[in-house]
Amino acid sequence: MQVSPRLTDTPFGSLPVLNYGDDEVAQSMTIARFLAKKAKLAGKDDLEQAQADMIVDYISDLTTDVIKVIMAKTPEEKNQLGETFFKTTLPNFLKTSEALLKKRGGKHFAGSDVSFLLTNKFLFTRQL
Ligand SMILES: N[C@@H](CCC(=O)N[C@@H](CS)C(=O)NCC(=O)O)C(=O)O
């Protein structure tokens, strides 16, 4: 596999990269957290930030499972991984997420306001 010249200019040979002034920041979740802090959407205190982070990381776990399905090498492997994902992984994810949301009052996973979780959920929904 060849890496494009543009990617070799990035810190880890991958995208996304945020150009910030004369600096650059790589890793999608690091960028999201950085921008969330700048926009005051990272959570009001350490606990809210941790509550937002735990959901973002949970969604990242699910994204990893989706990528495994997408990157499957054979149609058989794709079918098998896809079936496990849609019959087990995704329903479990939705069940545990819904339970947590209810436990937290039914409106926000973290704190009592909009947070950068929204961006992450939006991105993930688009990937599905
Ligand atoms: N953990 C990294 C993963 C980055 C990553 O895998 N990026 C892919 C695109 S989604 C990439 O640039 N791959 C290199 C390539 O396609 O050659 C992040 O979240 O930013």
Image: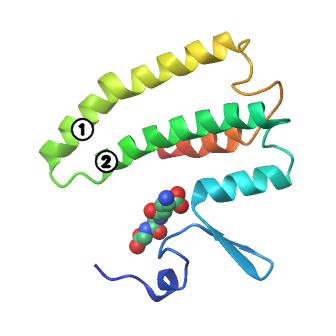
Q: Which residue is mark 2?
A: 68
Neighbour tally class for label 1: few under 14, some 14-19, many 20 plus, Cα within 10 Å: some
Residue that mark 1 sits on: 81
Location of residue 65 by image quarter = top left
Label 2 beta carbon less than 8 Å to ligand 1 = no
Which amino acid is tagged 1?
Answer: Leu
Neighbour class for label 2 at 10 Å: few (<14), some, many (≥20)? some
Three-letter code for the amino acid on which mark 2 is drawn = Lys
Report whether 108 appears left or right of 71: right
Residue 83 is left or right of residue 114, and the answer is left
Seen in the picture, residue 25 relative to 93 is either above or below; the reply is below
Q: Residue furthest bottom?
A: 5
Answer above or below: position of 69 versus 38: above
- Residue furthest to the front in view is 46
Q: Quadrant of the N terminus?
A: bottom left
Label located before the other in sequence (1 or 2): 2
Residue at the spot 66% in from the left edge and 69% down from the top edge: 25
- Residue sitting at x 40%, y 46%: 64
Q: Secondary structure at mark 1?
A: helix
Of 8 and 86, the residue lying toward us: 8
Query: Residue 62, position in %: x, y?
Result: 44, 38
* C-alpha separation, residue under disc 1 versus residue under disc 2: 8 Å
* Circle count: 2
Are the two marked residues, 1 and 2, in contact with CB atoms closer than 8 angstroms?
A: yes
Q: Could you say which quadrant of the image residue 117 lies in?
A: top right
Q: Residue at x 18, y 55 (%)?
A: 73
